[in-house]
């Protein structure tokens, strides 16, 4: 009991340092994950001397953190943004993973002298991109929505097939004609399970009259965790089920959606910080020095050969311009996922597994520096910035159960077509009324002759039956202006 204050105090201090590191890394242009790893290394054997070398616990905590990161990523993914890139994203997250393994494995077999199973295992561990890095970096980069959507889908989905490949290769399972069927089953079952639990969870949350606002975010995250657990127990892909359930919930008409998204973002940050600090604590600087050469060779193969070829092959059917293919190749960000996957063969006590873990650490550090520091510059060279659409209006709903009504809260974003619209032009459906505008910290009851402005926060009171139509109308005007209906914009 006497150790509890010390543990809590140390944990809080690390968390505060990591939070401050986000702003520090932003100013320097460095990816924050490197600072989290540095904090872990500083606490470990080379710094304060904390000894931690349990691969089983690292793998378990790493997967738990990955579930939280995928949950946050799915809840904050807008279907309207990723739908145009659905085919590209699925191809990158499935076919490209197989191609990356098929290219990286033989190359490392020849360059590093690895046996075939070990070489393919290296390829499987290195194949997935990092969802945390992609979600946090690309959404604020001002890139075309189709590119961002494809990369988001890839990073959210490709953990699942890579995980299956790593488990099969690490456990020494016989690789025969049944393996593709196993992969198809696990991915298909995970997809179906995620869809079922996502829609069922959304239906239940809309009808549940929970006594406190804070219970809605907890329940939403719990549904995503149940999706992971159910998937694993049914021998399906729990990671895919988690992400799919989160995407469904994130795009459903949930009560207190903005509170849920904020809560999920906080959990995502906590998972990222905890995961990278833990991995830094597990790392041994002495061993990492010995793994610099194989790590650099693997990084070069992945970045200059496997990733470009897999992108080229999978994007040809979609007629993606060459400059976008170049960016997709360079934007395959690696992070915690390959390190967590490398813990699986180490837990299975596979020969050469420690060398793989150390090389992956080196690779992640090198590629994070190389890609993270040059991604924005490459986008400018390829003339990709500035094509992204303005951030879509966010509509939050709070149920007024006793009155059988809904309270919609809307903030008008920069670039929204709601700016300059007269209230008389808004034409909300019968049963919905704009009751309050908050502008520059001052609130007032609007008149029909008032015009909306960017930055305004507005409150709309609606009956339950009119709520969906009111939200669609707000989104339609946000995208196309007061003549949205004539332009074919329905707000869906």
Image: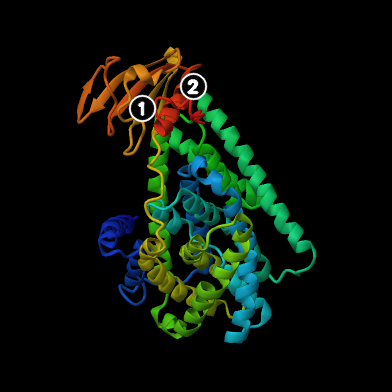
| In the depicted structure, whether residue 329 falls above or below residue 242 | below
Query: Which residue is pictured at 45% across the width and 38% down the height?
Result: 218
Query: Which residue is pictured at 57% across the width and 67% down the height?
Result: 127
Left or right side of 371 for 193: right
Q: Nearer the viewer, residue 319 or 345?
A: 319
- Secondary structure at badge 1 equals strand
- Secondary structure at badge 2 equals helix
Q: Residue furthest right?
A: 177
Q: Position of residue 307 (x, y in %)?
A: 55, 69
Q: Give the numbered dot on residue 353.
A: none
Evaluate whether residue 138 shows in this view. Answer: yes
| In the depicted structure, whether residue 215 falls above or below residue 2 | above
Evaluate whether residue 434 shows in this view. Answer: no
Q: Give the numbered dot on residue 409.
A: 1
Question: Dot 1 surroundings within 10 Å: few (below 14), some, or many (20 or more)?
Answer: many
| In the depicted structure, whether residue 155 falls above or below residue 448 | below
Q: Nearer the viewer, mark 1 or mark 2?
A: 2
Q: Position of residue 205 (x, y in %)?
A: 51, 29
Question: Dot 2 surroundings within 10 Å: few (below 14), some, or many (20 or more)?
Answer: many
Q: Nearer the viewer, residue 443 or 187?
A: 443
Location of mark 2 (residue) = 469
Q: Nearer the viewer, residue 224 or 326?
A: 326
* Mark-to-mark CA distance, 1 and 2: 15 Å
| Total residue callouts | 2
| In the depicted structure, whether residue 429 falls above or below residue 489 | above
Point out the image quarter for the N terminus. Answer: bottom left
């Amino acid at each position: 009991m006497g150790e509890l204050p010390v543990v809590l105090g140390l944990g809080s201090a690390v968390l505060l340092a990591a939070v401050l590191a986000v702003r520090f890394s932003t100013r320097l242009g460095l990816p924050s994950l490197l600072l989290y790893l540095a904090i872990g290394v500083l606490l470990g054997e080379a710094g304060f001397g904390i000894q931690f070398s349990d691969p089983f616990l690292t793998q378990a905590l790493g997967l738990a953190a990955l579930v939280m990161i995928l949950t946050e990523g799915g809840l904050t993914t807008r279907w309207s943004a990723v739908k145009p890139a659905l085919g590209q994203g699925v191809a990158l997250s499935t076919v490209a993973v197989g191609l990356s393994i098929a290219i990286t494995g033989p190359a490392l077999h020849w360059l590093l002298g690895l046996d075939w199973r070990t070489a393919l295992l290296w390829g499987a561990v290195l194949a997935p991109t990092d969802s945390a890095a992609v979600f946090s970096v690309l959404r604020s980069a001002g890139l075309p929505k189709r590119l961002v959507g494809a990369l988001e889908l890839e990073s959210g989905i490709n953990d699942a097939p890579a995980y299956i490949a790593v488990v099969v290769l690490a456990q020494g399972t016989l690789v025969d004609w049944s393996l593709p069927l196993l992969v198809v089953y696990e991915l298909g079952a995970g997809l179906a399970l995620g869809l079922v639990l996502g829609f069922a969870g959304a239906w239940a949350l809309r009808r549940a009259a929970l006594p406190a606002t804070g219970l809605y975010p907890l329940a939403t995250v719990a549904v995503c965790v149940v999706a992971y657990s159910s998937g694993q127990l049914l021998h399906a892909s729990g990671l895919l089920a988690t992400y799919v359930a989160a995407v469904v919930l994130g795009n459903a008409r949930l009560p207190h959606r903005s509170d849920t998204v904020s809560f999920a973002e906080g959990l995502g940050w906590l998972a990222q910080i905890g995961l990278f600090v833990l991995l830094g604590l597990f790392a041994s600087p002495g061993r990492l020095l010995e793994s610099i050469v194989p790590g650099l060779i693997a990084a070069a193969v992945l970045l200059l050969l496997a990733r470009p070829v897999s992108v080229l092959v999978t994007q040809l059917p979609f007629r993606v311009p060459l400059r976008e293919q170049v960016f997709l190749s360079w934007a395959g960000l690696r992070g915690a996922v390959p390190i967590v996957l490398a813990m699986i063969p180490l837990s299975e006590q596979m020969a050469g597994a420690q060398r793989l873990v150390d090389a992956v650490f080196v690779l992640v550090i090198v590629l994070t520096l190389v890609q993270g520091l040059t991604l924005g510059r490459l986008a400018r060279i390829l003339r990709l910035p500035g094509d992204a659409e303005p951030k879509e209006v966010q509509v939050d709903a709070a149920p007024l159960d006793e009155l059988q009504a809904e309270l919609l809260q809307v903030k008008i974003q920069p670039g929204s077509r709601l700016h300059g619209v007269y209230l008389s032009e808004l034409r909300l459906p019968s049963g919905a009324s704009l009751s309050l505008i908050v502008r520059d910290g001052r609130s007032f009851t609007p008149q029909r002759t008032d015009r909306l402005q960017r930055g305004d926060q507005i409150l709309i009171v609606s009956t339950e039956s009119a709520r969906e139509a009111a939200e669609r109308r707000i989104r339609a005007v946000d995208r196309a202006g007061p003549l949205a209906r004539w332009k074919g914009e329905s707000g869906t």
